[in-house]
């Protein structure tokens, strides 16, 4: 009786095709890879306007070149990897030809990210040779380790070729492929934190504003995702050679490292040349590189205008004239210093796209002449007087 019931039950005799009948860890790997592709696609769309605005700038410093390499190579890599992972028509011979593509491309992109971090940390430490030497040595070790580790990857022996073409490590020590960049990103995150808190000691600022101003959230995101990846590589134990649990987070670690690094580039204040400037430095330090050739000239003209705008001035002067009170003046240097102290804006508004010497959406300073507010009997009269040759 029971045998007849089992034979007549269609559910008992039904079997899933091999590409759907997946082990639990491989199934979770595929779901998580879909999440990775979603993050990559969303970030590509969100950054499109800022990518175009950066492209319109005239200069092509190393950071800009690195941005576009990351921008275009990352989608190419993960589209190709997704096809190999989900296409049920891939044969074993095709996988044997393709499987090294992911570790090699990831090594290239992560090394570019590390180079960007090196350039940026070097800039916020005022081109310190010691910092540059330490990070340069770590980057060189990272490149060598990742390149050598690629030789120890192999095709994960899944039960059926239709379950996906997946590259995995042959031995446990292959985890050093991700240890090297994790050490580098830990160093850059620590140095960025140290520099920010050093500036906070000199100029008090809220922690939230400090994080947004210096992009600490971006460095922190890169560090966290790489630490989670280390957890899966060295703490989680696979059930066998066909288990992909070790590499389940590697794609997400690569995508987030790349996307956060692109945002670090976009958040650079001033020109991208030589890594930009540090927002937490004093006004004189941050502007000396770009204005040293013009400041003395402006001060000379400001002194010549002093008699007409309320006294001797050290540079171009803002005159604020209440209708019933005496005249009050501020030099441009004082106004810049006040703006630095009262920083409350989105970091992107002072990035390489908006806050450089010549922003994309702003006119050069030479286009502005004297501007006067309309006369009225009440309120404050603001006169901006500047002279250019």
Image (cartoon, rainbow, N blue to C red):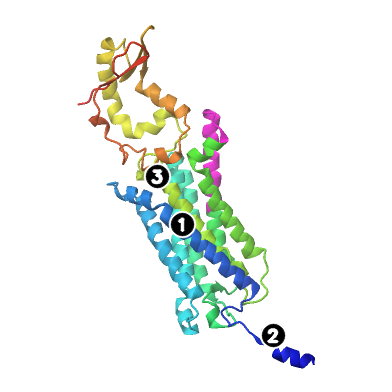
Residue 11 lies in quadrant: bottom right
Circle 1 residue: 42
Residue at the far left: name it: 389
The numbered disc on residue 12 is 2
Specify whether residue 198 is in view: yes
What residue is at 52 percent from the left and 48 percent from the top? 219
Which is more toward the observer, 163 or 239? Answer: 163
Residue 75 % position (x, y): 42, 63
Q: Earlier in the sequence, mark 2 or mark 1?
A: 2
What residue is at 69 percent from the left and 85 percent from the top? 12
Specify whether 198 is left or right of 75: right
- Compared to 148, does 11 lie above or below? below
Numbered disc 1: secondary structure: helix
Magenta stretch: dominant SS? helix
Q: How far apart are marks 2 and 1 (CA)?
A: 42 Å
* Magenta stretch: includes residue 200: yes
Numbered disc 2: secondary structure: helix
Q: How far apart are marks 3 and 1 (CA)?
A: 27 Å
Numbered disc 3: secondary structure: helix
- Compared to 90, does 237 lie above or below? above
Closer to the eye: label 3 or 1: 1
Residue 137 % position (x, y): 48, 54
- Compared to 40, does 196 lie above or below? above
Q: Where does the N terminus fall, quadrant-wise?
A: bottom right
- Compared to 37, does 297 lie above or below? above
Q: Which of marks 2 and 3 is nearer the N terminus?
A: 2
Circle 3 residue: 275
**Region of the chain picked out in magenta, as a range:** 185-207
Specify whether residue 110 is in view: no
């Amino acid at each position: 009786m029971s045998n007849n019931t089992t034979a007549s039950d269609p559910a008992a005799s039904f079997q899933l095709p091999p590409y759907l009948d997946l082990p639990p860890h491989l199934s979770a790997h595929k779901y998580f890879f879909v999440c990775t592709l979603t993050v990559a696609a969303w970030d590509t769309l969100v950054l499109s306007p800022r990518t175009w605005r950066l492209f319109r700038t005239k200069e092509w410093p190393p950071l800009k070149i690195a941005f576009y390499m990351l921008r275009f190579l990352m989608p190419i890599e993960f589209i190709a990897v997704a096809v190999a992972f989900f296409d049920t028509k891939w044969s074993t011979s095709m996988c044997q030809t393709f499987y090294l593509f992911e570790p090699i491309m990831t090594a290239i992109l992560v090394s570019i990210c590390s180079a960007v971090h090196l350039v940026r940390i070097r800039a916020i430490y005022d081109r310190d040779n010691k910092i540059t030497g330490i990070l340069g040595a770590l980057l060189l070790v990272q490149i060598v380790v990742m390149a050598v580790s690629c030789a120890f990857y192999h095709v994960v022996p899944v039960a059926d070729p239709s379950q996906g073409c997946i590259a995995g490590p042959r031995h446990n020590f292959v985890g050093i492929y991700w240890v090297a960049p994790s050490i580098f990103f830990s160093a850059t995150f620590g140095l960025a934190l140290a520099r920010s808190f050093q500036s906070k000691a000199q100029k008090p600022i809220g922690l939230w504003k400090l994080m947004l101003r210096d992009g600490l959230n971006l460095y922190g995101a890169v560090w966290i995702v790489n630490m989670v990846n280390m957890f899966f590589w060295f703490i989680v134990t696979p059930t066998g050679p066909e288990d992909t649990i070790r590499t389940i987070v590697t794609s997400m670690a690569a995508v987030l490292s790349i996307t956060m690094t692109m945002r670090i580039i976009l958040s650079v204040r001033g020109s991208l040349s030589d890594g930009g400037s540090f927002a937490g430095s004093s006004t004189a330090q941050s502007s000396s590189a770009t204005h040293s050739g013009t400041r003395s000239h402006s001060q000379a003209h400001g002194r010549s205008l002093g008699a007409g705008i309320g006294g001797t001035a050290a540079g171009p002067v803002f005159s604020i004239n209440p209708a019933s009170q005496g005249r009050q003046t501020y030099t441009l240097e004082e106004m810049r210093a006040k703006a630095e102290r009262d920083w409350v804006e989105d970091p992107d508004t002072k990035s390489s796209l908006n806050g450089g010497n010549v922003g994309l959406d702003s006119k050069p300073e030479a286009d502005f002449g004297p501007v006067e507010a309309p006369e009225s009997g009440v309120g404050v009269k603001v006169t901006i007087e500047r002279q250019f040759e």
